Image (spheres, rainbow, N blue to C red):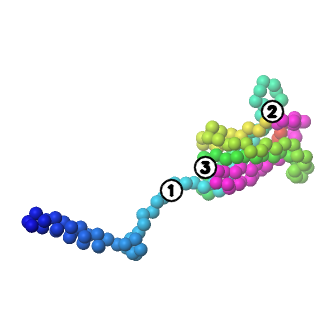
C-alpha cells in the first residue's frame, strides 16, 4: 500500500492539471496561428524592350523584353507561368494596325529569371521583317501564373534597328 500512495498522488495531480486546461471551444483556448510566407502577384510590368538580332547577320530576329510579376509593394515575385504575346503594327495616332504575329503558351521558367530584374523574354519573328528603323509596333502580353490568375500589359516599341 505504501508503494501505491506516491503513484496515486501522481495520478491525482495529473488529473487535476488536465481538468484545469481550457477546452478547444473555450474563450481561453486559442488555436495557434500558422503563417505561410507567400507573396501574391498583383500585376505585371514590362520593360527594356529591344529589337534584337541573335545570330551573325545584321537583320533583326525578333524582340526581347523583361517581364516583372510584382506584388502590391511593387517587388518582383519569382513565379513561373505561361506567356502569350501578340504583335501589331502601330497606326498613326497609336492604334493597333495590321496583326503581325502571336507567340502562344510560352513557358516562363526559373531559368528565365534574371535577379533582380525579372524574366527575360525573347520572341523571334517567324514571317516578319521590319521595313525601317522607324516602324513601330504594339505588343500585348498575357501572363498566366500557376494558380490561374491572368495579367495583361502592353507596350509600344520600335521594331527595327
* Image spot of residue 80 (x, y percent): 64, 46
In the rendering, which numbered label is found on residue 36? Answer: 1
- Is residue 3 positioned above or below 139 on the image? below
In the rendering, which numbered label is found on residue 157? Answer: none
Q: Secondary structure at mark 3?
A: loop
- Residue at left offset 74%, top offset 50%: 142
- Residue at left offset 45%, top offset 63%: 33
Q: Secondary structure at mark 2?
A: loop
Which residue reaches farthest top?
56
- Residue at left offset 32%, top offset 71%: 21
142 within the magenta span: yes
Which residue reaches farthest front?
1
In the rendering, which numbered label is found on residue 77? Answer: 3
- Residue at left offset 74%, top offset 53%: 152
Q: Quadrant of residue 50?
A: top right
146 within the magenta span: yes
Which of discs 1 and 3 lies nearer the camera? The answer is 1
Location of mark 2 (residue): 61
Of 29 and 19, which appears nearest the observer? 19
Which residue reaches farthest bottom?
27
- Report, in whole angstroms, how far the alpha carbon at label 1 lies from the one at label 2: 44 Å
- Report, in whole angstroms, how far the alpha carbon at label 3 lies from the one at label 2: 29 Å
Q: Earlier in the sequence, mark 1 or mark 3?
A: 1
Region of the chain picked out in magenta, as a range? 125-154
- Quadrant in which the N terminus appears: bottom left
* Image spot of residue 132 (x, y percent): 89, 36
Q: Quadrant of residue 160?
A: top right
Q: Earlier in the sequence, mark 3 or mark 2?
A: 2
Of 23 and 122, which appears nearest the observer? 23
Amino acid at each position: 500500500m505504501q508503494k501505491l500512495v506516491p503513484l496515486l498522488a501522481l495520478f491525482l495531480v495529473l488529473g487535476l492539471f488536465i481538468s484545469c486546461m481550457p477546452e478547444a471551444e473555450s474563450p481561453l483556448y486559442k488555436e495557434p496561428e500558422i503563417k505561410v510566407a507567400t507573396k501574391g502577384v498583383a500585376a505585371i510590368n514590362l520593360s527594356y524592350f529591344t529589337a534584337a538580332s541573335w545570330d551573325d547577320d545584321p537583320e533583326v530576329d525578333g524582340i526581347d523584353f523583361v517581364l516583372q510579376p510584382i506584388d502590391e509593394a511593387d517587388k518582383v515575385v519569382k513565379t513561373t507561368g505561361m506567356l502569350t504575346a501578340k504583335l501589331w503594327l502601330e497606326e498613326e495616332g497609336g492604334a493597333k494596325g495590321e496583326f503581325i504575329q502571336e507567340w502562344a503558351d510560352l513557358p516562363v521558367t526559373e531559368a528565365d529569371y534574371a535577379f533582380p530584374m525579372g524574366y527575360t523574354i525573347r520572341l523571334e519573328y517567324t514571317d516578319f521583317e521590319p521595313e525601317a528603323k522607324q516602324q513601330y509596333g504594339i505588343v500585348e502580353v498575357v501572363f498566366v501564373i500557376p494558380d490561374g490568375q491572368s495579367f495583361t500589359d502592353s507596350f509600344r516599341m520600335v521594331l527595327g534597328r
